Image (spheres, coloured by chain):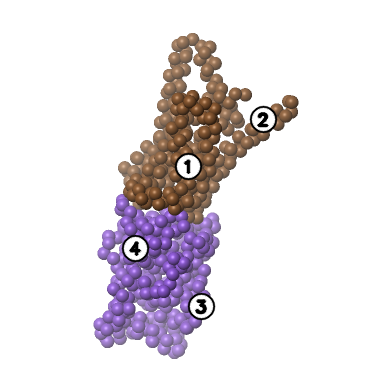
Chain colours: A purple, B brown
């Protein structure tokens, strides 16, 4: 189904009551931080869209494929802040303190500031999204995330017209993260999305997994999930979200520009220079399966890249 | 100094028949022990498989472990000459063929894991990978060379090839280079394991180079 059609239908079917309620909820949250009349006015105009969308988009893109086990998801993943090995994040993240936590929202937006993690969680509608996750290393999982749509946070921040990208920064705590002490990558890890990508309702800021708070190994307390892109776009333990005019630097692109691009959309037709992206091993399965364009979310996201050369913009 | 000088020949020739028989049996036992030792990592892998100790991506673990052991066996094969030069442990040369064959066995298990388990014997895919992926191309080339060395490792082939045998088996250094390249290129960011092997190869080759240099200098002084 086309995303525009889903959005259109959502706002058609929604009752005025619901719009009112969700907008009021949104306003209550925004009021805490907004402070000024001007900011409230901006929040109101965004609030209507966001509120309506929340109701129509609950559980959007959720797959009925069997999720991987909690054990697999929390003991097999990449998080170089804790080491190179895929067992390292679960092994080495015991000292990490995810709370208290706050996220700084800054840059080209009207409603910037430092937001406590608890505020964000209570402000936005937390829902479950069961997504496929395709790693650039050609393995995949199905993960039941809990989180809220990034578009809601963008709406709250009220970006200015010049803002065209969203830049994310991970936490820098070498004293708690052995991979940072060893300098395994240039830290802090940074990532980015185009603003219209960030507004796609599939994109969530995950705060939980299997209805539990995120484990340290998976990027506690708050991380990005962009299901149609390779896993490395899903920056973990986010401390800063900035609205910027130019395409922001991204860590893996800095590390190996010809291997990892800014877009990193899952694409079976564009191989990694050193290995095929045409198929993948779903963790827990024996036979490889074919990799789907946009990881199977093409109907909801392909419009974002209309007219773009996805071989050059890998 | 002759490079192939197993000390036992003298003892066996000098001693009575009974002693010779004991020595022969001991040698056979020692070869069995070397075979057993070199297969322990494979047995452990089988044990870990059946006791679910290979993690959530067992095929990846098997691929990595067989590859690591192939590299380790290759280092051990190449370490025998330096150990003889440095410590005079000439008896070790008797086991070099076995350790070399163990290298081939682990490299074959590594390749089989990739072709049979990972790709599910999708031969078109295998052919495409070998042609299109440089790290697989060099890995496969290294395995082909090992195959040639394994086939020609028998006494019959040593006799038949004569002097050319030693030349052919110098290809083991090429195998080491290809294997290192394969390991480096297969890594996303972590170079620590291939670097460890690079250091070991530099060490075992360094002793050879150093020894050759000393020998040449000594010869120059004498003349």
Q: Which residue is nearer to you in this view: A118 or A70? A: A70
Residue A98: % across, % down: 44, 65
Residue at (50%, 64%) from the top-left corner? A253
Label 1: chain letter? B
Whether residue A106 appears in this view of the structure is no
User: Marks 4 and 3, how far apart in space?
Assistant: 31 Å
Q: Residues within 10 Å of mark 3 (few under 14, many from 20)?
A: some
Disc 4 target residue: A292
Disc 1 target residue: B142
Residue sitting at the far top: B16
Q: Secondary structure at mark 4?
A: loop
Disc 2 target residue: B215
Label 3: chain letter? A
Disc 3 target residue: A245
User: Marks 2 and 1, how far apart in space?
Assistant: 31 Å
> Do labels 4 and 1 touch, CB within 8 Å?
no
Where B161 falls versus A176 (above or below)?
above
Residue A230: % across, % down: 41, 63
Q: Is residue B209 left or right of residue B124?
A: right
User: Which of the two discs, 2 and 1, labels the residue nearer the N terminus?
Assistant: 1
């Amino acid at each position: 189904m086309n995303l525009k059609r889903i959005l259109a239908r959502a706002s058609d079917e929604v009752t005025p009551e619901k719009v009112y309620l969700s907008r009021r909820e949104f306003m209550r949250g925004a009021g805490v931080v907004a402070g000024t009349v001007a900011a409230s006015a901006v929040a109101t105009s965004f609030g209507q869209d966001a509120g309506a969308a929340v109701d129509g988009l609950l559980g959007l893109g959720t797959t009925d494929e069997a999720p991987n086990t909690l054990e697999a998801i929390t003991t097999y993943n990449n998080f170089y802040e804790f080491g190179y090995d895929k067992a390292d994040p679960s092994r080495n993240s015991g000292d990490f303190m995810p709370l208290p936590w706050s996220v700084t929202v800054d840059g080209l937006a009207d409603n910037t500031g430092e937001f406590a993690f608890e505020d964000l969680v209570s402000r936005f509608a937390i829902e479950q999204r069961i997504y496929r996750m395709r790693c650039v290393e050609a393995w995949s999982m199905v993960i039941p995330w809990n989180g809220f749509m990034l578009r809601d946070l963008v709406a709250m921040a009220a970006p200015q017209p010049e803002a065209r990208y969203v830049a994310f920064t991970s936490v820098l705590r070498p004293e708690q993260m052995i991979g940072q002490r060893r300098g395994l990558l240039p830290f802090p890890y940074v990532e980015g999305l185009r603003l219209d990508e960030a507004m796609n309702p599939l994109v969530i800021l995950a705060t939980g997994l299997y209805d539990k708070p995120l484990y340290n190994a998976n990027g506690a307390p708050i991380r990005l999930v962009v299901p149609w892109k390779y896993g490395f776009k899903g920056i973990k333990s986010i401390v800063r979200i900035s609205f910027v005019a130019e395409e922001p630097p991204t860590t893996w692109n800095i590390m190996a520009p010809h291997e990892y691009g800014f877009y990193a959309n899952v694409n079976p037709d564009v191989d990694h220079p050193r290995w095929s992206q045409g198929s993948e091993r779903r963790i827990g399965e024996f036979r490889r399966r074919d990799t789907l364009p946009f990881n199977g979310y093409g109907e909801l996201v392909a419009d974002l890249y209309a007219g773009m050369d996805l071989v050059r913009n890998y | 100094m002759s490079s192939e000088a197993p000390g036992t020949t003298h003892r066996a020739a000098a001693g009575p028949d009974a002693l010779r028989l004991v020595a022969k049996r001991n040698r056979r036992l020692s070869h069995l022990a070397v075979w057993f030792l070199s297969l322990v990592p494979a047995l452990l892998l089988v044990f870990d498989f059946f006791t679910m100790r290979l993690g959530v991506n067992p095929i990846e673990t098997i691929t990595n472990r067989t590859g690591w052991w192939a590299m380790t066996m290759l280092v051990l094969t190449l370490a025998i000459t330096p150990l003889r030069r440095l410590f005079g442990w000439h008896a070790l040369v008797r086991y070099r063929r076995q350790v070399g064959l163990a290298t081939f066995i682990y490299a074959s298990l590594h390749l089989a894991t990739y072709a049979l388990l990972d790709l599910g014997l999708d031969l078109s895919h295998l052919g495409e990978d070998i042609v299109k992926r440089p790290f697989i191309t060099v890995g496969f080339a290294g395995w082909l060379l090992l195959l040639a060395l394994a086939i020609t490792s028998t006494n019959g082939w040593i006799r038949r090839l004569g002097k050319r045998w030693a030349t052919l088996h110098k290809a083991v250094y090429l195998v080491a280079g290809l294997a290192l390249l394969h390991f480096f290129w297969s890594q996303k960011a972590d170079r620590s394991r291939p670097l460890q092997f690079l250091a070991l190869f530099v060490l075992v080759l360094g002793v050879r180079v150093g020894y050759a240099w000393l020998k040449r200098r000594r010869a120059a002084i004498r003349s």
